[in-house]
Image (tube, rainbow, N blue to C red):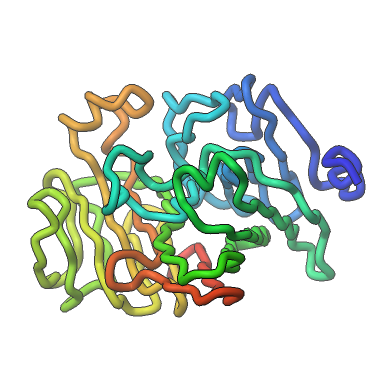
Amino acid sequence: MTIENKIQAISAIKLSDTKSYFGQAHQALPLLIIDSPLCYASICLQGAHLIEFAAKDKAPLLWASPKAEYKQGKAIRGGVPICFPWFGENQLDKSKPGHGFVRNKIWQLDSAKELSDGRISLTFSIESDEDSLTLFPYEFNAQFQVVLGNEIELKLATQNCSEQIMPISFALHSYHPVSELSEVKVEGLHFTTYLDNTSQYQANIQQGDVVFDGEVDRLYLNVGNEQIIRTQTPIALRSDTCKSAIVWNPAAKKAAATADLGEENYPSFVCVERGNAFSDSWYLTPGEIKQASLVIDYAE
Protein backbone atom coordinates (compact mmCIF):
# COMPACT_ATOMS: atom_id res chain seq x y z
CA MET A 1 0.00 0.00 0.00
CA THR A 2 1.36 3.43 -0.91
CA ILE A 3 1.90 6.16 1.65
CA GLU A 4 -0.95 8.14 0.10
CA ASN A 5 -3.37 5.19 0.44
CA LYS A 6 -2.39 4.61 4.04
CA ILE A 7 -3.00 8.25 4.83
CA GLN A 8 -6.28 8.40 2.95
CA ALA A 9 -7.48 5.48 5.06
CA ILE A 10 -7.59 7.83 8.04
CA SER A 11 -9.45 11.11 7.64
CA ALA A 12 -7.34 12.72 10.38
CA ILE A 13 -4.10 12.41 8.41
CA LYS A 14 -3.11 13.95 5.10
CA LEU A 15 0.05 14.52 3.09
CA SER A 16 1.20 18.11 2.63
CA ASP A 17 4.30 19.63 1.06
CA THR A 18 3.29 23.25 1.56
CA LYS A 19 2.36 24.07 5.14
CA SER A 20 1.58 22.82 8.62
CA TYR A 21 -1.18 23.84 10.98
CA PHE A 22 1.40 25.82 12.93
CA GLY A 23 1.92 28.34 10.15
CA GLN A 24 5.37 27.38 8.89
CA ALA A 25 6.05 26.75 5.21
CA HIS A 26 7.59 23.37 4.44
CA GLN A 27 8.02 23.28 0.67
CA ALA A 28 10.96 20.93 0.26
CA LEU A 29 9.94 17.90 2.34
CA PRO A 30 6.48 16.30 2.41
CA LEU A 31 4.87 16.18 5.85
CA LEU A 32 2.20 14.04 7.41
CA ILE A 33 -0.31 16.51 8.85
CA ILE A 34 -2.53 15.28 11.68
CA ASP A 35 -5.67 17.17 12.61
CA SER A 36 -7.66 14.91 14.90
CA PRO A 37 -10.28 15.71 17.56
CA LEU A 38 -7.47 15.30 20.12
CA CYS A 39 -4.47 17.07 18.61
CA TYR A 40 -2.59 18.80 15.81
CA ALA A 41 0.81 17.53 14.67
CA SER A 42 3.21 17.39 11.74
CA ILE A 43 5.70 14.61 11.00
CA CYS A 44 8.35 14.44 8.29
CA LEU A 45 9.15 11.13 6.60
CA GLN A 46 12.80 12.18 6.59
CA GLY A 47 14.00 11.00 9.97
CA ALA A 48 10.49 9.93 11.05
CA HIS A 49 10.73 13.39 12.58
CA LEU A 50 7.87 14.62 14.77
CA ILE A 51 8.17 18.38 14.24
CA GLU A 52 5.12 19.90 15.92
CA PHE A 53 2.48 18.81 18.41
CA ALA A 54 -0.25 20.40 20.49
CA ALA A 55 -3.29 18.83 22.12
CA LYS A 56 -6.49 20.62 21.14
CA ASP A 57 -7.01 23.87 23.05
CA LYS A 58 -3.55 23.58 24.64
CA ALA A 59 -0.14 25.13 24.03
CA PRO A 60 2.48 23.27 21.90
CA LEU A 61 4.69 20.70 23.62
CA LEU A 62 7.39 20.98 20.95
CA TRP A 63 9.39 23.87 19.51
CA ALA A 64 10.68 24.22 15.94
CA SER A 65 13.15 26.91 14.90
CA PRO A 66 11.71 29.65 12.68
CA LYS A 67 14.96 29.31 10.72
CA ALA A 68 14.79 25.53 10.33
CA GLU A 69 15.67 24.33 6.84
CA TYR A 70 13.53 21.65 5.24
CA LYS A 71 15.98 20.15 2.79
CA GLN A 72 16.66 16.58 1.80
CA GLY A 73 19.63 15.22 3.72
CA LYS A 74 19.67 18.02 6.32
CA ALA A 75 18.49 17.55 9.89
CA ILE A 76 15.53 19.73 10.91
CA ARG A 77 16.15 22.07 13.84
CA GLY A 78 13.37 21.42 16.35
CA GLY A 79 10.71 18.90 17.25
CA VAL A 80 12.07 15.43 18.05
CA PRO A 81 15.02 14.41 15.85
CA ILE A 82 16.16 10.80 16.36
CA CYS A 83 19.90 10.66 17.11
CA PHE A 84 20.88 7.07 16.18
CA PRO A 85 22.91 4.80 16.07
CA TRP A 86 25.20 7.07 18.06
CA PHE A 87 24.60 10.18 20.11
CA GLY A 88 26.86 13.24 19.73
CA GLU A 89 30.26 12.77 18.16
CA ASN A 90 31.22 9.30 17.05
CA GLN A 91 33.78 8.44 19.71
CA LEU A 92 35.76 6.17 17.38
CA ASP A 93 35.78 8.45 14.33
CA LYS A 94 34.99 12.14 14.80
CA SER A 95 34.86 12.67 11.02
CA LYS A 96 31.54 10.82 10.91
CA PRO A 97 28.32 12.87 11.16
CA GLY A 98 27.29 13.95 14.64
CA HIS A 99 24.22 12.25 16.12
CA GLY A 100 24.32 9.39 13.62
CA PHE A 101 22.58 9.35 10.25
CA VAL A 102 18.96 8.16 10.50
CA ARG A 103 17.58 11.67 11.06
CA ASN A 104 18.68 12.50 7.49
CA LYS A 105 17.21 9.41 5.84
CA ILE A 106 13.70 8.68 4.59
CA TRP A 107 11.88 6.19 6.80
CA GLN A 108 9.19 3.80 5.59
CA LEU A 109 5.67 4.43 6.86
CA ASP A 110 4.53 0.92 7.79
CA SER A 111 1.16 1.67 9.35
CA ALA A 112 -1.19 4.55 10.10
CA LYS A 113 -4.33 3.96 12.11
CA GLU A 114 -6.81 5.55 14.45
CA LEU A 115 -7.08 3.72 17.78
CA SER A 116 -10.38 3.03 19.55
CA ASP A 117 -9.78 5.95 21.95
CA GLY A 118 -9.22 8.42 19.10
CA ARG A 119 -5.43 8.53 19.27
CA ILE A 120 -3.46 8.37 16.03
CA SER A 121 -0.75 5.70 15.77
CA LEU A 122 1.99 5.83 13.14
CA THR A 123 4.76 3.27 12.77
CA PHE A 124 7.92 3.92 10.76
CA SER A 125 10.90 1.69 9.98
CA ILE A 126 14.41 1.85 8.57
CA GLU A 127 17.15 -0.72 8.04
CA SER A 128 20.82 -0.77 7.22
CA ASP A 129 21.89 -0.43 3.60
CA GLU A 130 25.09 -0.08 1.59
CA ASP A 131 25.45 3.59 2.53
CA SER A 132 24.87 3.06 6.26
CA LEU A 133 27.35 0.18 6.40
CA THR A 134 30.14 2.55 5.38
CA LEU A 135 29.41 4.61 8.51
CA PHE A 136 28.24 1.91 10.90
CA PRO A 137 29.47 -1.61 10.06
CA TYR A 138 26.47 -3.46 11.49
CA GLU A 139 23.28 -4.71 9.90
CA PHE A 140 20.21 -3.56 11.82
CA ASN A 141 16.59 -2.63 11.54
CA ALA A 142 14.80 -0.03 13.62
CA GLN A 143 11.13 0.76 14.21
CA PHE A 144 9.69 3.99 15.57
CA GLN A 145 6.10 4.26 16.79
CA VAL A 146 4.45 7.63 17.35
CA VAL A 147 1.11 7.71 19.19
CA LEU A 148 -0.59 11.11 19.40
CA GLY A 149 -3.60 12.06 21.49
CA ASN A 150 -3.66 14.31 24.54
CA GLU A 151 0.06 13.54 24.91
CA ILE A 152 2.96 12.18 22.86
CA GLU A 153 4.04 8.54 23.18
CA LEU A 154 7.21 7.44 21.39
CA LYS A 155 8.70 3.95 21.10
CA LEU A 156 12.04 3.16 19.46
CA ALA A 157 13.07 -0.46 18.90
CA THR A 158 16.11 -1.87 17.13
CA GLN A 159 17.34 -5.34 16.24
CA ASN A 160 20.92 -6.42 15.69
CA CYS A 161 20.89 -8.29 12.39
CA SER A 162 24.65 -8.72 12.24
CA GLU A 163 26.81 -11.54 13.61
CA GLN A 164 28.68 -9.48 16.18
CA ILE A 165 27.80 -7.39 19.22
CA MET A 166 26.35 -4.06 18.07
CA PRO A 167 26.86 -0.86 20.13
CA ILE A 168 23.97 1.61 20.11
CA SER A 169 23.63 5.01 21.72
CA PHE A 170 20.70 7.28 20.92
CA ALA A 171 18.57 10.19 22.01
CA LEU A 172 15.08 11.42 21.22
CA HIS A 173 16.37 14.98 20.88
CA SER A 174 13.24 16.89 21.89
CA TYR A 175 13.02 20.69 21.74
CA HIS A 176 10.46 22.34 24.04
CA PRO A 177 9.05 25.88 24.13
CA VAL A 178 9.67 28.07 27.17
CA SER A 179 8.24 31.45 28.11
CA GLU A 180 11.20 33.02 29.96
CA LEU A 181 14.52 31.15 29.75
CA SER A 182 16.06 32.88 32.78
CA GLU A 183 13.20 31.60 34.93
CA VAL A 184 13.04 28.03 33.56
CA LYS A 185 13.92 25.12 35.83
CA VAL A 186 14.24 21.42 35.06
CA GLU A 187 13.21 19.21 37.94
CA GLY A 188 14.00 15.54 38.48
CA LEU A 189 17.82 15.53 38.15
CA HIS A 190 18.88 16.47 41.71
CA PHE A 191 21.90 14.43 42.90
CA THR A 192 22.35 12.92 39.42
CA THR A 193 25.80 12.58 37.83
CA TYR A 194 26.27 14.46 34.59
CA LEU A 195 29.01 14.92 31.99
CA ASP A 196 29.50 18.58 31.06
CA ASN A 197 30.15 19.07 27.36
CA THR A 198 31.16 22.71 27.97
CA SER A 199 34.20 21.44 29.91
CA GLN A 200 35.32 18.34 27.96
CA TYR A 201 32.75 16.05 29.58
CA GLN A 202 33.96 16.69 33.11
CA ALA A 203 31.83 14.73 35.59
CA ASN A 204 29.73 16.66 38.12
CA ILE A 205 26.75 16.03 40.40
CA GLN A 206 23.63 18.11 39.92
CA GLN A 207 22.62 20.14 42.96
CA GLY A 208 18.95 21.16 42.92
CA ASP A 209 17.08 22.01 39.73
CA VAL A 210 18.81 22.75 36.42
CA VAL A 211 18.73 26.46 35.52
CA PHE A 212 19.83 28.31 32.39
CA ASP A 213 22.20 31.17 33.18
CA GLY A 214 24.51 30.54 30.22
CA GLU A 215 25.31 27.72 27.84
CA VAL A 216 24.07 24.36 29.16
CA ASP A 217 25.16 21.11 27.48
CA ARG A 218 24.96 18.18 29.88
CA LEU A 219 24.43 14.45 29.65
CA TYR A 220 22.91 12.99 32.82
CA LEU A 221 23.41 9.28 33.50
CA ASN A 222 21.14 6.70 35.13
CA VAL A 223 18.42 9.28 35.69
CA GLY A 224 15.05 9.00 37.42
CA ASN A 225 11.95 8.23 35.38
CA GLU A 226 10.48 11.77 35.23
CA GLN A 227 11.76 15.26 34.50
CA ILE A 228 9.59 18.37 34.46
CA ILE A 229 10.33 21.60 32.60
CA ARG A 230 8.92 24.38 34.77
CA THR A 231 7.76 27.18 32.49
CA GLN A 232 4.45 28.90 31.69
CA THR A 233 3.12 25.59 30.30
CA PRO A 234 4.99 22.93 32.33
CA ILE A 235 6.09 19.86 30.36
CA ALA A 236 6.76 16.35 31.73
CA LEU A 237 9.01 13.70 30.18
CA ARG A 238 8.62 10.14 31.49
CA SER A 239 10.56 6.97 30.68
CA ASP A 240 11.79 3.95 32.58
CA THR A 241 13.80 2.60 29.62
CA CYS A 242 15.71 5.74 28.60
CA LYS A 243 18.36 5.97 31.31
CA SER A 244 20.10 9.11 30.03
CA ALA A 245 18.85 12.70 29.92
CA ILE A 246 20.46 15.44 27.88
CA VAL A 247 19.79 19.08 28.77
CA TRP A 248 20.85 21.70 26.25
CA ASN A 249 20.57 25.37 25.41
CA PRO A 250 23.34 27.01 23.37
CA ALA A 251 23.03 30.57 24.79
CA ALA A 252 23.56 33.64 22.63
CA LYS A 253 27.02 33.14 21.12
CA LYS A 254 26.56 29.60 19.81
CA ALA A 255 22.99 30.32 18.71
CA ALA A 256 24.23 33.28 16.66
CA ALA A 257 26.78 31.02 14.94
CA THR A 258 24.12 28.42 14.06
CA ALA A 259 22.42 29.36 10.79
CA ASP A 260 19.18 27.46 11.37
CA LEU A 261 18.79 28.80 14.91
CA GLY A 262 19.90 32.42 15.35
CA GLU A 263 20.70 34.47 18.44
CA GLU A 264 17.17 35.84 18.64
CA ASN A 265 15.67 32.37 19.08
CA TYR A 266 17.75 30.73 21.82
CA PRO A 267 15.59 32.14 24.68
CA SER A 268 12.51 30.41 23.21
CA PHE A 269 13.42 26.76 23.89
CA VAL A 270 15.27 24.18 25.91
CA CYS A 271 16.14 20.63 24.96
CA VAL A 272 15.43 17.97 27.58
CA GLU A 273 16.08 14.72 25.78
CA ARG A 274 15.85 11.11 26.88
CA GLY A 275 17.87 8.24 25.48
CA ASN A 276 20.74 5.89 26.28
CA ALA A 277 24.29 7.15 25.79
CA PHE A 278 27.82 6.80 27.18
CA SER A 279 27.65 4.35 30.12
CA ASP A 280 23.91 3.88 29.49
CA SER A 281 24.49 2.71 25.90
CA TRP A 282 23.10 -0.56 24.57
CA TYR A 283 25.19 -3.52 23.40
CA LEU A 284 23.01 -5.91 21.42
CA THR A 285 24.01 -9.51 20.82
CA PRO A 286 23.30 -11.01 17.37
CA GLY A 287 19.53 -11.17 16.82
CA GLU A 288 18.74 -9.24 20.02
CA ILE A 289 15.98 -6.60 20.08
CA LYS A 290 15.87 -3.68 22.51
CA GLN A 291 13.12 -1.10 22.94
CA ALA A 292 12.81 2.23 24.72
CA SER A 293 9.74 4.41 25.21
CA LEU A 294 9.07 8.02 26.14
CA VAL A 295 5.96 10.01 27.05
CA ILE A 296 5.91 13.78 26.64
CA ASP A 297 2.94 15.30 28.42
CA TYR A 298 1.51 18.41 30.04
CA ALA A 299 2.64 18.58 33.67
CA GLU A 300 0.64 19.77 36.65
Which residue sits at x=91%, y=46%? 1
Q: How many marks?
A: 0
| Location of residue 210 (image quadrant) | bottom left
Query: Picture coordinates of residue 244 (x, y %)?
Result: 33, 68
Residue 46 percent across, percent down from the top left: 61, 38
276 versus 183 height, above or below:
below
Is 203 left or right of 69, judged from the image as shown? Answer: left
Of 21 and 75, nearer the camera is 75
User: Which of 158/198 is in front?
Assistant: 158
- Relative to 140, is 262 above or below? above
Q: Residue at x 49, y 51 (%)?
A: 82
In the figure, 87 relative to 70: above or below?
Answer: below
Of residue 26 and residue 2, the one placed in the foreground of this image is 2
**Which residue sits at x=57%, y=76%?**
288
In x, y percent, where is residue 81? 48, 46
Residue 154 sits in which quadrant? bottom right
Can residue 155 be seen in this snapshot? no
